[in-house]
Amino acid sequence: IVILSGDHLYRMDYMKFVQRHRETNADITVAAIPCDEKRASDFGLMKIDKTGRINDFAEKPKGAALEEMKVDTTILGLTPGEASEKPYIASMGIYVFKKEVLIDLLNEKMPTANDFGSEIIPEAAEDMRVQAYLFNDYWEDIGTMKSFFEANLALAQHPPRFEFYDALNPIFTSPRFLPPAKVQNCQVTDAIISHGAVLEDCHVENAIVGLRSRVGKGVRIVDAMLMGADYYESEDVRQKLLECGEVPIGIGDNTVIQNAICDKNCRVGKNCVIVNQAGVEEANYEEDGIYIRSGIVTVLADATIPDGTVI
């Protein structure tokens, strides 16, 4: 049985993972990435013996505790040079279990456990064969606002660290049957523009523009994500909203958005500046449709930001 996490970005051939599990006759196999000292303290680390069997765990260790978690990663297949640079292995939070082992752990040995990584796996490693499986490729945990934001923007870089456009191992999006993006007289650099988006006379740089996004004239989108919209507003509806002093879905004319995420169906008015001018790290203004995490401004889903707002 393969257990996967829902907030990671990577591409793995799971059959190789399962095959290694069978070859070692493991009760549990844990996918692991090698990492250097700079990143190691951000993860749950593991130690292994000469056969790759896991015999110790440490959650985000630092200092002397981190030093104790060093292992010889050549055991898992790294070259001596790579092993010197990356002497730690971190759990990816994905596992292969023997079916009967998983059932026994959940029903008999640990019926009250709620977490694989911090409870079930360390406990099982004491008397079961728990092996490490090396994954030495791109992997990113996107479970925080900062990591989600940075990983998405990295997709627009040239060349990107992670590539969706792999002819041999493609990753498909859900079919939505939308028209292609419409880009009129815009300056676009290092960006991904999704289906159904409409952009006019704007500047887009290092950005993700989601499906059905509407970006008005004179807008600057830099280091930002527009999540797009779940539906279109007709031109008549948009015009009536503007005539009544209200804000249509999308980004209004002459607005600047930088270091920010605009969530689904949000309405950002004209002449707004959303750049976190004060450099705030953490803040909640949910009543105004805004919060800030790790310095990244997020306009909440379905929120309305009035004309002229400065953040």
Image: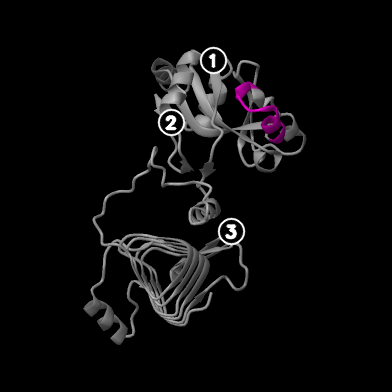
Camera-nearest label, 2 or 1: 2
Answer yes or no: is residue 111 visible.
no
Identify residue for label 3: 294
The image shows residue 101 at horizontal and vertical percentages of 44, 17
Please name the amino acid that badge 3 sits on.
Ser
Percent of width and height locating residue 192: 43, 59
Q: Percent from the top left, x then y, of residue 13?
A: 43, 31
Residue 162 vertical position relative to residue 209 in the rendered view, above or below? above
CA distance separating discs 2 and 3: 33 Å
Image disc number at residue 129: 1
Quarter of image, res 253: bottom left
Of the image marks 1 and 3, the number of the one nearer the N terminus = 1
Which residue sits at x=38%, y=68%? 266
Q: Which structural element holds mark 1?
A: loop
Return the residue at label 2.
Answer: 13
Q: Nearer the viewer, residue 98 or 202?
A: 202
Residue type marked 1:
Arg
Residue 123 left/right relative to 176: right
Element assignment for label 3: loop
